[in-house]
Amino acid sequence: MPGHIDRMAKTKKTVTLGLFAALSLGIYAFESLLPPLFVIPGIKPGLSNIITLYCLKRFGKKEAALVLLVRILISAMLFGNPISLLYSLTGGFAALGIEMISDALLKGKALHLTGAFGGMFHNMGQLLCALFILASVSVLAYAPYLILAGIITGLFTGLASFFLLKIKIPEQP
């Protein structure tokens, strides 16, 4: 019976992560319908990062990376193109990488700051991707605006993740 219980636990975890990936994709799709919030092109709230941060804290690094990757790949297939896939992968994994480091250094006690670092690095990752693709340093003129926007939106997603983690989800039998 122990093998059966282990398989059930793995199946439950896989299904749960799939649901979080779908939720993240749904949030991303909703966000793509919103009008631009800022004058500068490409700045979005990054609400799907709430789910990535939640998964990082609740399940761990590997699981958060998997949920992020699934969301990015499916959103690129549904809403994007190969270039948007590059931007999303670069920004998403730059954000997740610094969020992992930040969470470890802050000992998990300041998720809003972890989110702020994530937002900032997401935008910097995308800016470096644009620098590489466009081969023009003129894109660096956006850096101050992207850093500020990333910090503000990241603070929000970090706080939202913090409060989401406070919700007690009952275990199913």
Image (cartoon, helix red, strand yellow):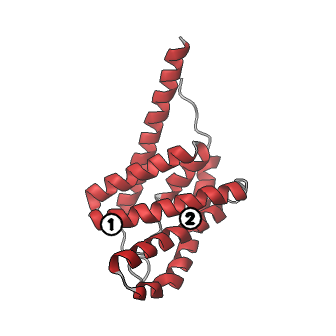
Label 2 sits on residue = 118
Residue 98 versus residue 26 in the image, above or below: below
Whether residue 2 sits left or right of residue 84 in the image: it is right
Q: Residue at x 58, y 55 (%)?
A: 161
On the question of residue 36 being in view, the answer is: no
Q: CA distance from mark 1 to mark 2?
A: 19 Å
Mark 2, residues whose alpha carbon is within 10 Å: few (<14), some, or many (≥20)?
A: many
**Toward the viewer: 105 or 168?**
105
Q: Quarter holding the C terminus?
A: top right
Q: Residue at x 73, y 54 (%)?
A: 107
The amino acid sitting under disc 2 is: Gly
Label 1 sits on residue = 84
Whether residue 104 sits left or right of residue 119 in the image: it is right
Percent across and percent down for residue 153 are 54, 70
Q: Residue at x 45, y 35 (%)?
A: 14
The amino acid sitting under disc 1 is: Ser
Whether residue 28 sits left or right of residue 143 in the image: it is left
